Amino acid sequence: MQFSAVQIAMLINGKVEGDPSATVASFGKIEEAVANQLAFLANPKYEEYLYTTKASVIIVNESQELKEAVSATLIRVPDAYSAFASLLQKYQEIVRQQLSGIQEPSFIAKSAKLGENVFVGAFSYIGENVIVGNNAKIYPGVYLGDHVKIGDNTVLLPGVKIYFDCVIGRNVTIHAGTVIGGDGFGFAPQADGSYKKVPQIGNVVVEDYVEIGSNACIDRATIGSTIIRSGAKLDNLIQIAHNVEVGHNTVIAAQAGVSGSTKIGSHVQIGGQAGIVGHIQIADGTRINAQSGVSKSVKIQNSAITGSPAYDYTSALRSQALSRNLPELEKRVKDLEKLVQQLLQEKESIS
C-alpha cells in the first residue's frame, strides 16, 4: 500500500514541510530507512540521522530545529512518538480489516454465534455457545472453550487458548501462546502428606482495551472471577494466579508473577521479574521496581518500592549508598579504635 505525505499528515494532524506528494510503502528506523519508507525522530540521540537517512518521509516534533538541509519530506506534529504510534495503529487496523471469512479446516459449534466481519483462521476451535463480537479476528490455531464470550474488535493471535466460561471484552489484543482460564494452583494438604485438588469453578474476565503479551498465563478463579480491568497492559511471560484483580490502566512487565487473591490497584507499574505474594493489596499508583519481592500490602498510594522484601525506593537507595561505603567506614572505625586506645594508654602513663 502506498501513502502520500499529505495523506499521512491528515491521519495524524500534522503539517507537511517539503513535497506533499512524496510516497511511502513501509516503515523503517531513521538510521536504517531507505527510499519509499517512513521514519520518525523523537529521541535527540538520533538527530544526526535526520540529515543522512534515505527515508522519503519523516515525522518530527514541531519544535525540531534544522541544523542542515534535509532531503526527506517532514511532517511536524506536537509529539512525534505518539503520532508515530497512532499511525502504526491505524496501519494495523487497515491490514486487519482485510482479514475476513472462515478458513478451513476449522471447527465452529452450531450453537456458536459469530458477529459481522469476523475472521476465523485455519485450525481454530470454537466451542458450544461461544459468542464472538463484530470485527473480531481469530488467528489460526486459537481455541475457544464452551460459553466463552469475545467482544467487538478483539484480536486473538495464533495459538491463544481461552478456557470455558471466560469473558474477553472489546478492543482486546491477546498475543500468541497465551492461556486464559487454566486452573488456579489450588491443592489442599492431606494428613498423609498428599495434596487434594481443589476444583477451580470460577472464570477469568478481561475488560475492554486490555493488551496481553505472548505466553502469559491468567488462571481462572476458584470461585468468582480473576479480573483484568480495562486499559491494563500485560507483557510476555506473566503469571496471574486465581482470584487476582489487576486494576485499570495498570502495566506489568515481563516475567512478573502475582499470587492468588491479591488485589492490584489502578495505574500501578510493576517491573520485570517482580514477585507479589498472595492475599495482599497494592494501592493505586504504586511503582514496583524490577525483581522486587512484595511480601505485604502497600497501603499508601503512589508509593515507589524496591528490593526483596520490597520497601521504600528512596530509603533503599540510601541503604545502597551506605553499603557501598562500608569498607571506608570500617577503616575509620578501626582508626578511631586505635586513637582511643592510644589516648587511654597516655592517660594511664600520666596517672
Image (cartoon, rainbow, N blue to C red):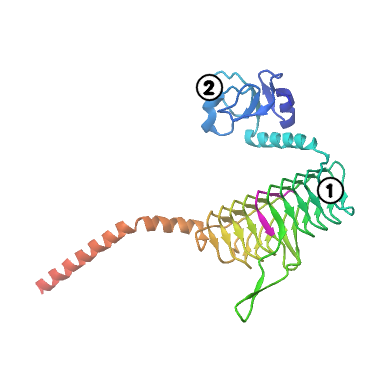
- Please tell me whether mark 2 sits on a helix, a strand or a loop: loop
Q: Is residue 153 left or right of residue 323?
A: right
| Label ID, residue 191 | none
Closest to the observer: 88 or 42? Answer: 88
**Amino acid type at mark 2:** Lys
Residue at the image position 87 percent from the left and 46 percent from the top: 115
Q: Position of residue 162 (x, y in %)?
A: 75, 55
Q: Is residue 215 magenta?
A: yes
Magenta residue span:
209-218
Residue linked to disc 1? 133
User: Magenta stretch: dominant SS?
Assistant: loop
* Mark 2 nearby-residue class (10 Å; few <14, some 14–19, many ≥20): few
Q: Is residue 301 left or right of residue 340?
A: right
Residue that protrudes farthest toward the right in the picture: 110
* Count of numbered badges drawn on the protein: 2
- Please tell me whether mark 1 sits on a helix, a strand or a loop: loop
| Quadrant of image for the N terminus | top right
| Quadrant of image for the C terminus | bottom left
Say if 199 sits above or below 176 in the image. Answer: below
**Amino acid type at mark 1:** Gly
Give the quarter of the image for residue 41: top right
Closest to the observer: 61 or 346? Answer: 61
**Mark 2 or mark 1, which is nearer the start of the sequence?**
2
Q: Is residue 149 magenta?
A: no
Closest to the observer: 217 or 273? Answer: 217
Residue at the image position 57 percent from the left and 60 percent from the top: 275
Q: Position of residue 62 (x, y in %)?
A: 63, 29
Q: Is residue 338 at least partly visible in the picture?
A: yes
Mark 1 vs mark 2: give the one in front. 1
Residue at the image position 72 percent from the left and 46 percent from the top: 158
* Mark 1 nearby-residue class (10 Å; few <14, some 14–19, many ≥20): many
| Label ID, residue 67 | 2
